[in-house]
């Protein structure tokens, strides 16, 4: 699941919401893998399958957001370096590290507590960083998906991931009646 989560964190930000559909595709792959392994264990209660499916969805989706938010300061730094005419006596790596650090600090200061939650607040409330807010930027940095669209993308991505995984894992559940019919008690 880790390699797919890493890919999802990159795919999610593709333009025009193209990447969101990878959540359904990778959900199918994850769900099919789980089904293949779990089917050997027999029948499971609906509650067990729903709990397991929910944990898979939240773990995969949450990890992709965590990775996306962790990569964000470096994206701002790369943007700043591409726009910079002169970085002074700094090395390119030093310049990028400085801008990334100031971006993290800006998110912590203006969208507390920073980190993943700060990134989410920034994405939902603003989606841009002005040059006066982060030293090193010459032009405003704008997210390709901000405010309503970021929330829409998050909602759609978790729904498609849940669809993909659950379409493969829910058949592992049996109702009590079906389970009793399949395994009658001896008299």
Image (spheres, helix red, strand yellow):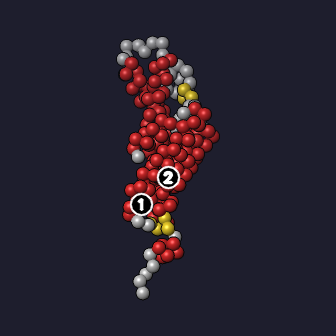
Q: Which residue is mark 1?
A: 39
- Residue at image point 52% right, 38% down: 12
Q: Earlier in the sequence, mark 2 or mark 1?
A: 1
Above/below status of 103 relative to 38: above
Residue 115 circle label: none
Q: CA distance from mark 2 to mark 1?
A: 15 Å
Residue 148 horizontal/vertical position (percent): 63, 40
Residue 17 horizontal/vertical position (percent): 59, 37
Mark 2 element type: helix
Say if residue 116 shows up in the picture.
no
Q: Which residue is mark 2?
A: 165
Q: Quadrant of residue 63?
A: top left
Camera-nearest residue between 17 and 34: 34
* Number of numbered discs overlaid on the protein picture: 2
- Residue at image point 40% right, 21% down: 95
Residue 27 horizontal/vertical position (percent): 49, 48
């Amino acid at each position: 699941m880790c390699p797919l989560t890493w890919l999802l964190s990159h795919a999610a930000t593709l333009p025009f919401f193209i990447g969101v559909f990878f959540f359904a595709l990778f959900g199918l792959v994850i769900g099919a893998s789980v089904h293949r392994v779990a089917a050997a264990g027999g029948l499971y209660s609906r509650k067990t399958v729903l709990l397991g499916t929910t944990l898979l969805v939240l773990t995969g989706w949450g990890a992709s957001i965590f990775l996306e938010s962790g990569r964000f300061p470096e994206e701002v730094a790369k943007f700043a370096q591409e726009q910079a005419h002169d970085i002074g006596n700094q090395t390119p790596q030093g310049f990028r590290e400085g801008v990334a650090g100031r971006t993290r600090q800006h998110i912590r200061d203006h969208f507390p507590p920073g980190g993943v939650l700060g990134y989410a607040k920034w994405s939902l409330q603003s989606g841009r960083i002005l040059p006066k807010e982060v030293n090193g930027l010459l032009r405003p940095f704008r997210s390709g998906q901000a405010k309503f669209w970021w929330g829409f993308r998050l909602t759609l991505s978790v729904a498609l991931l849940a669809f993909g995984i659950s379409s493969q894992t829910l058949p592992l559940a049996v109702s009590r009646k079906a389970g009793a019919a399949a395994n009658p008690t001896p008299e």
